[in-house]
């Protein structure tokens, strides 16, 4: 078992301040959890990294990345050992799409045939493909998970014409590897480059993920299937995904995915804007309609435990299972690799580890300091009334906010668009306009917020009728 990381491995994000190391007690707790999981899962090896405030602050490797082979001894993983990350790859495909969207080279509401003309599934939207809301069948044509032979580009596209849309779009969450294979083709058509080259140029290189790609190094972890009764290990064959690589073909390491988790927790402009990451991590469709604890956005899954929502993705390939989880408000993330085909639950463990860090060592908020005077907002501050209920306008961090009574979920942030006109840019009423109406003497007479009258005194709708 190895805990901690070297300074060169530890700095993975753009955080200006070094992260606070985990306490020894918390490190021991995390180590116990990982060791217990490795035994319970009967995985040859489990490799884990924990990120906080932009740095890989703790890692451990239990068991073997490679079992002994004849006279050769077993080999333990390091932070730089490559594992096949499976469907975590989809988040990179989604980021590439969003990067192209931000450049104006495509639109999320483009129909598929805008980029792949003549396809049978012409009317499906890119947004639906990203969110697993298209209703497309789960897998590409060809039983590739039995043959472990994936199609090249032309065969893949020919198979798309045989594939079914098994549900109406947005009818329900329906996970589709086929959809992400198609998104890879869209990326290639828009850029004129291979999918891997686009991901490398737009994501891997900017984040310093130098050990992530489609071709594993010779010292990669080997993947195994464990006999459920005998407990023996059999090495799984490698599976080149060819044209379907955008759905699950990347190899990566604890160090590289730590850089990725740090970026997702606190994004800058190296890949896409922070606003785009926010957009990708908003739920578009529920994955469990009864429990409402899971959702999917634009390439990222969300899991809710209590009041906390964690974003990330799981991955599964023959011999490899992966879990990536990030709690963005606290800037904490975890990566879990298991080199086994089945039996492990790395996404659940990654969530457990993030939750353990957040609960044991919660972030300390910066000290409050008095606001600078904003005389242009003075007339708007204080309690107003709308629809018979109080609404308060106040200044926080130099910006205008509103809140319905004391309900924090109703908070809305505004920016000025012009004289006596503000736009809600965050919160419950994002996108709506706040308009200031002045009396003949120049004082504020009332407000209109999303067209609703806002007055200093509580008025009935009858009082507002001219």
Image (cartoon, grey):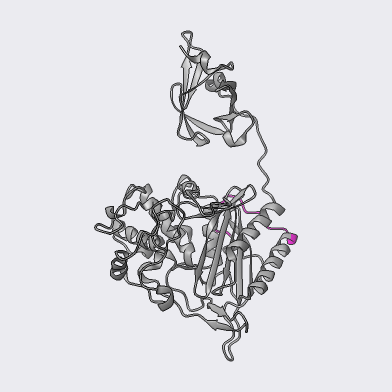
Residue farthest toward the right in the current orientation of the protein: 25
Query: In the rendered image of this protein, does residue 427 appear above or below residue 93?
Result: above
Residue farthest toward the left in the current orientation of the protein: 118
Q: Is residue 333 magenta?
A: no
Residue 44 sits in quarter: bottom right
Q: Main secondary structure of the magenta part?
A: loop
Residue range (magenta): 11-25
Q: Position of residue 319 (x, y in %)?
A: 52, 75
Q: Quadrant of the C terminus?
A: top left
| Residue located 43% across and 58% down the image | 203
Q: Is residue 99 visible?
A: no
| Residue located 44% across and 66% down the image | 248
Residue 54 sits in quarter: bottom right
Q: Position of residue 125 (x, y in %)?
A: 35, 51
Left or right of 107, for residue 222? right
Left or right of 341, for residue 367? right
Q: Position of residue 119 (x, y in %)?
A: 27, 59
């Amino acid at each position: 078992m190895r805990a901690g990381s070297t300074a060169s491995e530890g700095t993975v994000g753009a955080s200006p301040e070094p992260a606070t190391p985990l306490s020894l007690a918390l490190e021991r707790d995390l180590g116990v959890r990982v060791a217990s999981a490795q035994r319970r899962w009967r995985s040859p090896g489990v490799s884990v990294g924990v990120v906080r405030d932009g740095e890989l602050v703790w890692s451990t490797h239990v068991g073997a990345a490679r079992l002994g082979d004849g006279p050769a001894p077993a080999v333990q993983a390091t932070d730089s050992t490559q594992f096949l990350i499976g469907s975590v790859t989809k988040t990179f495909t989604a980021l590439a799409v969003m990067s192209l969207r931000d450049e104006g080279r495509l639109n999320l509401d483009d129909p598929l045939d805008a980029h792949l003309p003549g396809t049978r599934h012409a009317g499906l939207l890119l947004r639906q493909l990203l969110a697993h809301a298209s209703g497309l069948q789960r897998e590409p044509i060809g039983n590739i998970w039995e043959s472990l032979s994936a199609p090249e580009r032309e065969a893949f596209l020919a198979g798309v014409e045989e594939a079914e849309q098994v549900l109406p779009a947005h009818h329900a969450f329906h996970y589709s590897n086929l959809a992400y294979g198609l998104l890879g083709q869209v990326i290639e058509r828009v850029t004129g480059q291979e999918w891997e080259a686009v991901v490398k140029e737009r994501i891997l290189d900017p984040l310093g993920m130098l050990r992530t790609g489609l071709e594993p190094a010779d010292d990669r972890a080997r993947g195994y299937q464990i006999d459920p009764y005998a407990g023996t290990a059999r090495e799984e064959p490698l599976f080149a995904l060819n044209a379907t690589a955008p759905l699950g073909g990347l190899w990566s390491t604890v160090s590289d995915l730590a850089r990725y988790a740090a970026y997702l927790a606190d994004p800058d402009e190296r890949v896409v804007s922070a606003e785009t990451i926010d957009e990708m991590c908003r739920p578009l469709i529920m994955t469990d309609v009864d429990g409402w604890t899971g959702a999917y956005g634009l390439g990222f899954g969300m899991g809710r435990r209590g009041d906390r929502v964690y974003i990330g993705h799981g991955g599964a390939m023959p011999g490899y299972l992966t879990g990536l989880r990030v709690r963005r408000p606290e800037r904490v993330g975890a990566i879990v690799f298991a080199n086994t085909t089945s039996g492990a639950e790395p996404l659940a463990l990654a969530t457990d580890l993030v939750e353990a860090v957040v609960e044991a060592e919660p972030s300390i908020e910066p000290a409050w300091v008095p606001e600078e005077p904003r005389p242009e907002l003075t007339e708007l501050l204080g309690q107003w009334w709308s629809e018979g209920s109080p609404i308060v306008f106040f200044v926080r961090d130099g910006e205008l906010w509103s809140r319905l009574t004391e309900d924090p979920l109703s908070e809305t942030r505004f920016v000025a668009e012009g004289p006596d006109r503000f736009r809600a840019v965050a919160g419950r009423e994002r996108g709506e306009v706040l308009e200031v109406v002045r009396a003949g003497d120049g004082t504020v007479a009332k407000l209109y917020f999303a067209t609703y009258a806002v007055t200093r005194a509580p008025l009935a709708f009858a009082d507002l009728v001219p």
